[in-house]
Image (cartoon, helix red, strand yellow):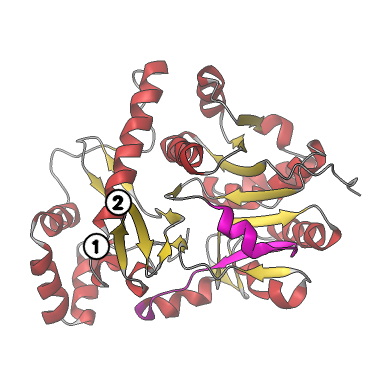
Amino acid sequence: MFVQGTPDAAMRHYCTLFDRNYLLRGLALYRSLERHAGRFTLHVLCMDDVVHDLLRRMALPDVKLVRRVDFEDPELLAVKPSRSVAEYCWTCTPSLPLYLLAQHPEIELISYLDADLYFFSCPEPIFEELGRDSILIVEHRFSPRFVRFEVNGKYNVEWLTFRRDERALAALRWWRERCIEWCFYRLEENRMGDQKYLDTWPQRFAGVHVLQHPGAGVAPWNFANYRISARDGALRVDEAPLIFYHFHGFRLRSDGHHIPMGDMYLEDGSFPREIYEPYHMALEEALRLVRRFDPAFGSGIEAVEKVMPAGDIATRVYWTVPEWCRAAVRKLVPGRLRARLLRALGRHDHRASG
């Protein structure tokens, strides 16, 4: 049983987890919070010693590190050998907010963030919308062409907020038990990783709020739903401010170029370049910072092969031609044929979620 915490209403507490391959994304997330989130603490579960050592040496303000060896308990360690790296990270996700609530009685609200989120404006509207509810979850909001992927989960484990009360704690304990029992990268018996368990939460638990703000949770699988524009120096989604974007599938390359998202997402709407360019710059800034401490650091950056695979050549050409050419291809080439070509080139996205 958790003791009631002491409210710290002026401070927002966030948590995330990542290994060395997501370190650059985690640093970009942190910098975006620094710019937009007001007073906050970001609790980072370091999934390997490389991340812990580098972040410890950086001594970033408003970051608290959690070592994996301090976090892992017998139940997690028992299932760890049966999970891939990604599956184990998903397995740990519900345990992280529980751990922090137990360790820090001053935390009244804890929000889990995927490491590949990036903030473009203040997140306070999300908390205002939560009100006095206990749990906040975010829908995928798939664009029409991707609605079929809802079978993998209606909600995305990208932002989850939990209040220190029995309603939220009951959901967290239940979710942790389910993920320890089963958390694999496959659709099986109405389960998929850690995320499909959320499908029943609005009916299973009291105090669950499904976020309605259109500017939170924008991602490759739904940006085509919105009109994205810049006004007065700020990005907007329809008429709402863009709060955060989920950069699922973003790939940095060792030649300085990047692949913004899986090819399957590029067939809907115009590419939101105004969203992706700042993120690429943020990752490059993070890489410069890391290399001040480890000049040879290259984790999470794809090496460019001397002979570029056909799929990568196709992607490079796609991004070289003007937008009107890409739009013409999307309009003139039937969707099924485009899908077959992408599969033949080895270009497909592994999962319509984060």
The stretch drawn in magenta includes residue 304: no
**Is 337 placed above or below 76 here?**
below
Identified at 57% across, 41% down, the residue is 17
Q: Are marks 1 and 2 in contact (CB under 8 Å)?
A: yes
Foreground: 178 or 1? Answer: 1
Question: What residue is shown with label 2?
Answer: 276
Q: Percent x, y for residue 354?
A: 48, 58
Sooner in the amino-acid sequence: mark 1 or mark 2:
1
Can see residue 290? yes
Image-quadrant location for residue 340: bottom left
Q: Percent x, y for residue 282?
A: 35, 38
**Is 192 placed above or below 12 here?**
below
Identified at 66% across, 47% down, the residue is 92
The three-letter code of the residue at mark 2 reads: Tyr
Can see residue 183? no
Foreground: 63 or 152? Answer: 63
Label 1: which secondary element = loop
Count of number-bearing discs: 2
What's the magenta region?
123-145
Image-quadrant location for residue 191: bottom right
Q: Separation of disc 1 and disc 2 at Cα?
A: 9 Å
Identified at 40% across, 24% down, the residue is 290
Identified at 66% across, 32% down, the residue is 66
Question: What residue is shown with label 1?
Answer: 271
Residue 302 shown left or right of residue 17 in the figure: left
Residue 235 shown left or right of residue 320 in the figure: right
Q: Percent x, y for residue 37?
A: 54, 43
